[in-house]
Amino acid sequence: MKNPLVSVIALNYNQTAVTCEFLKSLKGVTYKNLEVIVVDNASKEDPTDMIMSTYLEVRLIRSDKNLGFTGGNNLGIEASQGAYIFIVNNDTEVTPGIFEKLLAPFQQDQKIGMVSPKIYFYQQPNTIQYAGFSAVNPFTGRNRGIGNKEEDHGQHDRSGFTHYAHGAAMMVSREVIEQVGMFPDIFFIYYEELDWSSQVTKAGYKIYYQAEASLYHKESMTMGKESAIKAYYHNRNRILFMRRHSTPLQMMVFTLFLCLFTIPKTLLKYLLKGQFEHLRAFRKALAWHLHYTNDPKDMATRLNKSLRLV
């Protein structure tokens, strides 16, 4: 298919002005076979008039509750018609040729299932946020964004396979979604793109970093860089990701690392900073895992016993 339909899905949550800035940037793209879907995650104020008065081509879907990044995007995917789905943060601005360049790898290799562009920080437009992802360390549960916070001197201009797509901007083929399913709703936000990417690679597809495509990200405008909600979901989902994707040995080592290093360090950090709301969120994130035993492949019993000692 020469010019397949691309469904662009962006979430809005109490950021209608930011979302409109994103939609304005879409008007400058050179690829025209698009459907644009904005999912409103139960914002306090109805964004309909502000969006639809200027962007008549947009399909606006309003949810009556906040479904998070995972559920909101899944709602958009269910409503979409495109052969390719472009999941993109509303706090981004796209460049004119982004869609042609993101589509190109899919045409070259049928086993490519996801493609992400090079992502720059909006406020520092020559500073890279993402040029691929390293693998999650199986014993610490951490990974890094390749090129993150580096000034761009062309050092990451080579496209190629990577371990995970970036949730702020990822194109996925309809075929992959039909084979693998949509975002795992249990994550709500954070680590969801790592989990989804892992499921895609386990299904035999590849993740591709397209250096020729670019996008600018305003970063963390919804949750805030140090919000308690972010502390909760980031810590809860880091453990959840490991439970879903670790071998028994890896999970045992990760649990030791968590109990001996991560938990004491994090508790001390929040105490010294007087961030008691963050402290409560962190403790709540750990407590969640004492009751979650729904995954038959996880190490729930060992993890629960270890966490109860903290």
Image (cartoon, rainbow, N blue to C red):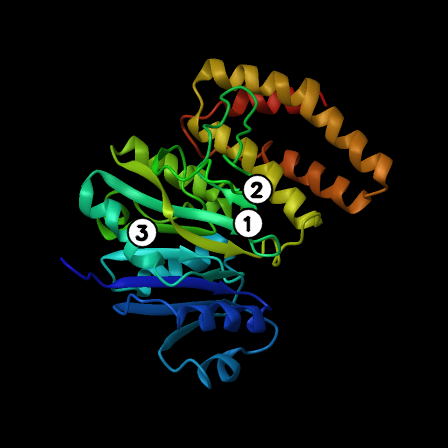
Residue 57 screen position, x and y as percent: 35, 79
Q: Is residue 272 left or right of residue 164?
A: right
Residue 146 in the image: above or below residue 95? above
Residue 62 screen position, x and y as percent: 46, 72
Residue 100 screen position, x and y as percent: 28, 57
Q: Camera-side residue: 190 or 99?
A: 99
Residue 28 in the image: above or below residue 263? below
Q: Residue at x 62, y 37 (%)?
A: 235
Gap in Å between the C-alphas at discs 2 and 3?
A: 23 Å
Q: Are marks 3 and 1 in contact (CB under 8 Å)?
A: no
* Residue 89's disc number: none
Q: Camera-side residue: 188 or 299?
A: 188
Q: Camera-side residue: 170 or 231?
A: 170
Q: Quadrant of the N terminus?
A: bottom left
Q: Amino acid at mark 2?
A: Glu
Say which of marks 3 and 1 sits in front.
Answer: 1
Say which of marks 2 and 3 sits in front.
Answer: 2
